[in-house]
Image (cartoon, helix red, strand yellow):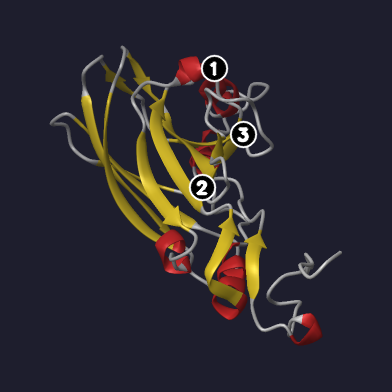
Amino acid sequence: FGPEVLQFICGTSSSIEQLPDGMEQVDVIVSQWMGYFLMYEARLDEVLQARQRWLKPDGLMFPDRAKLYLALMEDLDYKQHHFDYFDNVWGFDFTAMKEAAHGEPVVHAVDQGSLLSSSACVLDLDLKSCSAEDCFALASGFQVTCQRHGYLNGALCWFEISFNACHKPISFSTGPESLLTCWKQTAFFFKGEPVAVRGGDRVQGMVAVKRLVEGRRHLDIKFAIKVNSSNQAIHYF
């Protein structure tokens, strides 16, 4: 192979106690750590631990950047079939189930036509320098503008992954305008009656993400939404 040999080490920071053959550092870390909503079932902790333990100061991360986006959506059909459905289940009133159903995010392939607003980036991770807290203790404000008349059913999130350290930078998106991926998009349906919006309406909000127990994959997510001058609405997932 000549004087320069590529050596691959497969594993995680928790499964590798030390590097082989007396190696102390690596030149490149390649990982597929992303989960639904970027953070669900994500393995970011292990990637960052490997970075801290073994990556050379001038080493490369692939991917090296991740961005999480949010937009407002209208999906009356999904709402009717999966939430309003509980109003009459074979003649029985199951409305008590609605609140629990609204508390769970939905991994769902959403049509681009369901988007109500512009999108906003609520998280921008530089994998060479970020910490786990940047991701799992997130509190980010945003403002979007409604692009058409409709009814606000919830928020839709997706992410973009970039490989900027390549000789030719490349990226891919899991958004509704892109080719469908295994991650699809993550929809957060708000409980209560949907708010009517018009094109040009400004919506201010905040999204907060908290991992209560380190090492666990459960996330607590909070949305605060305010349309124009209306009262702020809070939604928990």
The location of residue 196, given as percent across then percent down, is 29, 19
Quadrant for the N terminus in the image: bottom right
The location of residue 169, given as percent across then percent down, is 53, 41
- Which of discs 3 and 2 lies nearer the camera? The answer is 2
Spatial CA span between label 1 and label 2: 39 Å
Give, as a three-letter code, the residue at label 1. Asp
Q: Is residue 144 left or right of residue 164?
A: left
Q: Which residue is mark 2?
A: 164
Q: Residues within 10 Å of mark 1 (few under 14, many from 20)?
A: few
Callout 3 secondary element:
loop
Q: Residue at x 13, y 31 (%)?
A: 229
State whether residue 187 is above or below residue 206. Answer: above
Q: Residue at x 56, y 40 (%)?
A: 168
Q: Which residue is mark 1?
A: 77
The location of residue 212, given as percent across then percent down, is 48, 69
Q: In terms of sequence position, does the residue under pointer 1 or pointer 3 come before the other? A: 1
Callout 1 secondary element:
helix
- Which of discs 1 and 3 lies nearer the camera? The answer is 3
- Which of discs 1 and 2 lies nearer the camera? The answer is 2
**Outermost residue toward the front in this view:** 2
Callout 2 secondary element:
loop
Label annotation for residue 184: 3
Nearer to the camera, 109 or 106: 109
**Outermost residue toward the right in this view:** 1
Give, as a three-letter code, the residue at label 2. Asn
Spatial CA span between label 3 and label 2: 23 Å
